[in-house]
Image (cartoon, rainbow, N blue to C red):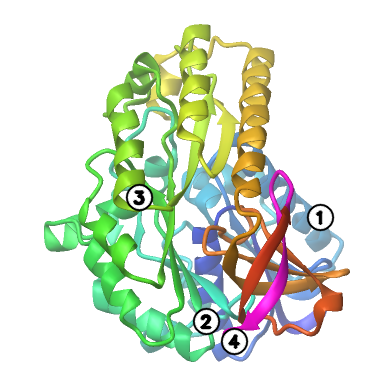
Amino acid sequence: MRKDKIDVITLGCSKNLVDSERLIAQLEMSGYKVEHDAEKPDGEIAVVNTCGFIADAQEESINMILELGERKRRGELKRLYVMGCLSQRFLSELEKEIPEVDKFYGKFNWDELLSDLGQTYNHEAQNKRHLTTPGHYAYVKISEGCDRRCSYCAIPIITGRHKSRPEEDILDEVRYLVGQGVKEFQIIAQELTYYGLDLYKERRIAQLIEHISDIPGVEWIRLHYAYPTDFPKELYRVMRERKNVCKYLDIALQHVSDPVLDAMHRHISKQETYDFVEEIRREVPGIHLRTTLMVGHPGETEEGFTELMAFVRWARFERMGAFAYSEEMGTFSAEHYADDIPEETKEARLSKLMRLQQRISGEVQGEKVGQTMKVIIDRQEGEYYVGRTEFDSPEVDPETLIAVSEGELKIGDFYLCDIYEADDFDLYAHVIQHIS
């Protein structure tokens, strides 16, 4: 057990990661040595930033807390703190069930941890972060919460109503990160198209992205987690005209069958969904769409699932994830619908949908063979340098592989590459030119 060392463990999404990075920076300013996601935590203090979104994520968070609680009982850990979404959602239950934890914090009061350690939160350095990602890219969270109230989703229960960050605060953070060497920015929110409605009484996501793109040193901007209903169409122009705004949008469509969309409270119809996909491809030529779909929501019939399959064949999403419905306590679906679709049916539908997407992905990637593309290098892994194009977000999307034998490449730099081969997901490339 190393004194004055704190292990911070982050579970869940990139929004949690941003909170951990801010916490780590504050801890380091207070004189602590901090390690993030260590394979073998050995500090005298551990902080677990939990996820509470779905059952699997909750189980992972609880197992991590219990594992560290056991270390504390054996005297291998002095103090254990828990923060984040699971803690926000089940605070009183966790306090009763896991007494080994010294204190639980919610998602929004983790700064109290500093005072509990005898330190003071530095408000002047609130945008300072200790990046846990490779130094050339970072996530920037522009808001918290969500006002959408989809029937199956527990996020509003955990995070509350949508709350935008002031634009100048976000721009200051981006400038700070550019000064730290960051070139690529993943703009994240639970629902980024709502940005500005609470603060400015209008949607300002297009203006915000335009202003971020004006900052010198910002090479790539990528947009995550949009919603199709009332999509701010001014964003089309920004994505089309700004060279450092990637032609990429992560937008969860969830389903296409009208009865299922209605049961989900998505406030969009099948025809409107088709029209939206058609419109964005027309307005932003070359855009790559990432979406998430759900199978097995209460009320999804075989006919409804067939409609979903037909939609995916038509839309040919460049990137797609899917998951099976699971009942989440407190949601509208859990309280008003019977979870009456057998698990084996859900899993069979999920497998069928993902097999279709794998074929589409292989075709989409194959169409890139022979093209020249800009690639950023993330790391070296075995015999390859591993990078990404503007159409690929870190961790979730395909990668571009370049043989180490081609010569030494610099991590975090951009290269112009010739794509010579593709498989279902990844690309293989030769370097043509070092860009920056």
Residue 182 is labelled as: 2
**Which image quarter holds the N terminus?**
bottom right
Q: Residue at x 46, y 16 (%)?
A: 307
Q: How many angstroms separate mark 2 from mark 4 (CA)?
A: 20 Å
Which amino acid, by three-letter code, is at mark 2?
Val
Q: Which type of secondary structure does the marked residue at label 2 adopt?
A: loop
Q: Which type of secondary structure does the marked residue at label 1 adopt?
A: helix
Instruction: List the residue tagged with mark 4.
Output: 28
Q: Residues within 10 Å of mark 1 (few under 14, many from 20)?
A: some
**Which image quarter holds the C terminus?**
bottom right
Highlighted range, magenta = 422-436
Tag 2 and tag 1, C-beta contact below 8 Å = no
Q: Residues within 10 Å of mark 2 (few under 14, many from 20)?
A: many
Q: How many angstroms separate mark 4 from mark 3 (CA)?
A: 31 Å
Q: Position of residue 102 (x, y in %)?
A: 63, 62
Residue 70 is labelled as: 1
Q: Which type of secondary structure does the marked residue at label 4 adopt?
A: helix
Q: How many angstroms separate mark 4 from mark 1 (CA)?
A: 26 Å
Q: Residue at x 21, y 62 (%)?
A: 204
Q: Residue at x 34, y 53 (%)?
A: 284
Q: Residues within 10 Å of mark 3 (few under 14, many from 20)?
A: many
**Can residue 334 be found in the magenta stretch?**
no
